[in-house]
Amino acid sequence: MMHSNVEMPMSDHSDKRDFPRFEVNTSGTLILQTGFKMSFVVKDMSQRGAKILLHKTSILPDAFTVEIVSPDRTKVKRCEAKRQWQRGPLVGIRLLSAKTITL
């Protein structure tokens, strides 16, 4: 069975969300105000938020910048983000502003 990088909208909690979430499997980089960077995997994403999996459990500050690579690897979305919740290496973030960079 062949899997694509972008899946169908997720049904869990969809009635509570402003925008549908889509399962994705792409990479990203989290950038703290100090300049420290750490990589992550985007598990699912919507127009205004994402669930990310850090490669190493770290306590994140409330605000930071993320760069998310498009599933086709042609663009990077740079966003100011806010931590909504965190359970170990799994983090829910709200995307506050975005700029798309074509690679």
Image: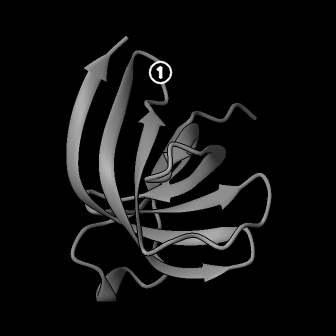
Q: Quadrant of the N terminus?
A: top right
As rendered, which of 9 and 33 lies closer to the eye?
A: 33
Does 40 appear above or below 14? above
In the image: residue 65, left or right of residue 97:
right
Residue drawn at point x = 69 percent, y = 57 percent? 54
Residue drawn at point x = 58 percent, y = 59 percent? 52
Q: Mark 1: which amino acid?
A: Asp
Image location (x, y in percent) of residue 76: 38, 27
Does 60 appear above or below 43? below
Image location (x, y in percent) of residue 9: 41, 60
As rendered, which of 26 and 64 lies closer to the eye?
A: 64
Residue drawn at point x = 47 percent, y = 67 percent? 10
Q: How many residues crowd mark 1 within 10 Å: few (<14), some (14–19), many (20+)?
A: few
In the image: residue 32, left or right of residue 53:
left
Does 26 appear above or below 101? below
Residue 3 is drawn in which quadrant? top right
Residue 29 is drawn in which quadrant? top right
Looking at the image, the residue that sits furthest to the bottom is 16
The residue carrying mark 1 is 72
What secondary structure is marked by label 1? loop
User: How are the residues colored?
Assistant: one colour
Image location (x, y in percent) of residue 42: 56, 50
Looking at the image, the residue that sits furthest to the right is 56
Residue drawn at point x = 21 percent, y = 76 percent? 18
Looking at the image, the residue that sits furthest to the front is 34
Q: Quadrant of the C terminus?
A: top left
In the image: residue 19, left or right of residue 78:
left
Residue 37 is drawn in which quadrant? top right
As rendered, which of 45 and 15 lies closer to the eye?
A: 45
